Amino acid sequence: MTTAVLTGIGVSAGSAAGEVARMAPAPALPEARALTEADVPAEVAAARGALGQVAEDLERRAGAVTGDAADVLSAQSMMVADPALGDQVEARIRSGADGAHAIAAAFGEFRAALEQAGGYFAERVADLDDLRDRSVASLLGLPMPGLPDPGRPYVLVAADLAPADTALLDPSQALALVTERGGPTSHTAILAKTLGLPAVVACDGAGTLTDGRPVLVDGAAGAVHVDPPPHAVTEAAEREQERRRLAESVSGPGRTADGHPVKLLVNLGASNELPAAAAADSEGVGLFRTEFLYLDRAQAPSAAEQVAAYREVFTAFAGRGVVVRTLDAGADKPLPFATAADEQNPALGVRGLRTATRDPELLRTQLAAIAEAAADSGAEVRVMAPMVSVPREAAAFAEQVRAHGLRAAGAMVEVPAAALRAGELAQVCDFLSIGTNDLAQYAFAADRTLGELAEFLDPWQPALLDLVRMAADAGARHGRPVGVCGESAADPALALVLVGLGVSSLSAAPSCLSDVRTALAARTLEDCRVLAGIALSAPDATSARARVLAEIAA
Ligand SMILES: C=C(OP(=O)(O)O)C(=O)O
Ligand SMILES: [Mg+2]
């Protein structure tokens, strides 16, 4: 049998074989259908049946999981089983609507009521939209929208994945992720690393993969083998086992072969990631993305809610360090209460630290909450600002952080101007952290969410590495540590280059740390400097990567 190979961008290493399960899109409402009197009883029964089927399906899924996920699914099941909803649907059919339109309209009415109630209720409208789509799909006999649930482990294939799609993804069922869109720093890439799942994004031809098709996903090579022969699956499993064995053979703080320390830290972006992050062999958190607290809401979380969420993290990391990043709203993380809806170029707009100029209270409340949660937590808490562009912003931020009694203030280097003037930032801050995801986006003027622009967003781009070197040199001149917390820190070969450029800490998804630790342990600092020189002198990203890998293999 010949096997087709689909290629894309490998964003999370490892390989896995399994059958495809697709994430179906929300169903489009068909043209309205006129009912005769005689049609009504059957239409009512079908619509009520669809609601019942969705409720049952959600209840079954709730029974198969535990914790927050089970609570969310049970609550959704109860919403769709609410007799008032069924009565509404029936009434609308009796007054002439067909089943699909009756369901959509009844949900629309509930939605309006929730929105009007405001607060917590208004935040649940997305759940109602999801239930509406499920009910309509069930009635029309279409695949269920959202995450699939084939009842066996599967390779998830989707057009793209958004944070809301994946909140309930069960990592024990998903074997690998394949998306048609997305780039190397997209949400899918970050999620895959967090869950330790092999992933290929911007995968040409992924749209042709149908449910049940056997595939072998190679996350390192960015390849999806369709209908792989059994020997290929066995070989891939053996390679995967060897990779894991090697990764587990070294532990403890990051060190090069000659003992140069490199802090290995974890990125943390949601409360459900906390157990794995805390259990990982790391010196702490290098990037605590706090946006998860603010997403999917009509208003910012209260101070008390923030204190509780931060305290949970700080307590889990008692005795270790935690770098909290203040709210990074805007662009790929829009928030209704913090971002303007009418910006033409949101990535170049009021985002990150700039949001605090428009709404100073947002930052004040957050810093006060961080300070309160940090007190007596046992963790060494440091705070940094996203999207710093000029030294003035960094100085004002640092002053505010210290005024809240917090010890260390840092600036992220994500804008080329910040890398060019990193020396001035280092003079007013205690540390710098390079966000290579955004730094690539802004250095190359390439939207980080577009798979089509992957070449520019490749963190091996020598021009990006020039900016990293500038920031690291500036940190060294002023005696300030400079870390990297973008996705580039998760690539073991690139991690060596970053260390050679002078970076002193690497922060990545917990599942990626052991590969990076093993790579460091096999090379001296001087080796890393040589590798950095090779990458910097390459003409482009592809040859930088190839030349460094060849030197490592030599
Ligand atoms: C770490 C970064 O921040 P985020 O991915 O959250 O924008 C980055 O830009 O590299
Ligand atoms: Mg960023």
Image (cartoon, grey):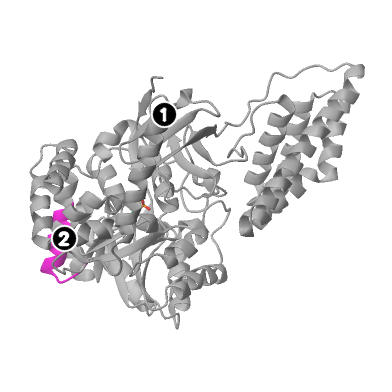
Asked where in the image residue 95 lies, by quadrant, the reply is top right
- Residue 305 appears at what percent x and percent y? 56, 68
Instruction: Looking at the image, tell me whether mark 2 or mark 1 is earlier in sequence order.
Output: 1
Magenta-colored span: 468-481
- Residue 254 appears at what percent x and percent y? 25, 66
Quarter holding the N terminus is: top left
Residue drawn at x 74%, y 19% as measured from the top left: 32
Q: Is mark 2 on a helix, strand or loop?
A: helix
State whether the magenta stretch is mostly helix, strand or loop. Answer: helix
Q: What element carries label 1?
A: loop
How dense is the environment of label 1, judged by Cα within 10 Å: few (below 14), some, or many (20 and up)? Answer: many
- Residue 511 appears at what percent x and percent y? 38, 55
Amino acid type at circle 2 is Ala
Q: Identify residue for label 2.
A: 472
The residue closer to the viewer here, 164 or 363, is 164
The residue closer to the viewer here, 502 or 224, is 224
Q: Identify residue for label 1.
A: 228
Q: Is residue 447 magenta?
A: no
- Taking the view exactly as shown, the residue that stands out farthest to the bottom is 376
Q: Can residue 53 be seen in this view?
A: yes
- Residue 256 appears at what percent x and percent y? 18, 64
The residue closer to the viewer here, 232 or 162, is 232
Residue drawn at x 37%, y 80% as measured from the top left: 405
User: With 360 as the anchor, is 391 left or right in this view?
Assistant: left
Amino acid type at circle 1 is Pro
User: With 252 as the anchor, is 129 left or right in this view?
Assistant: right
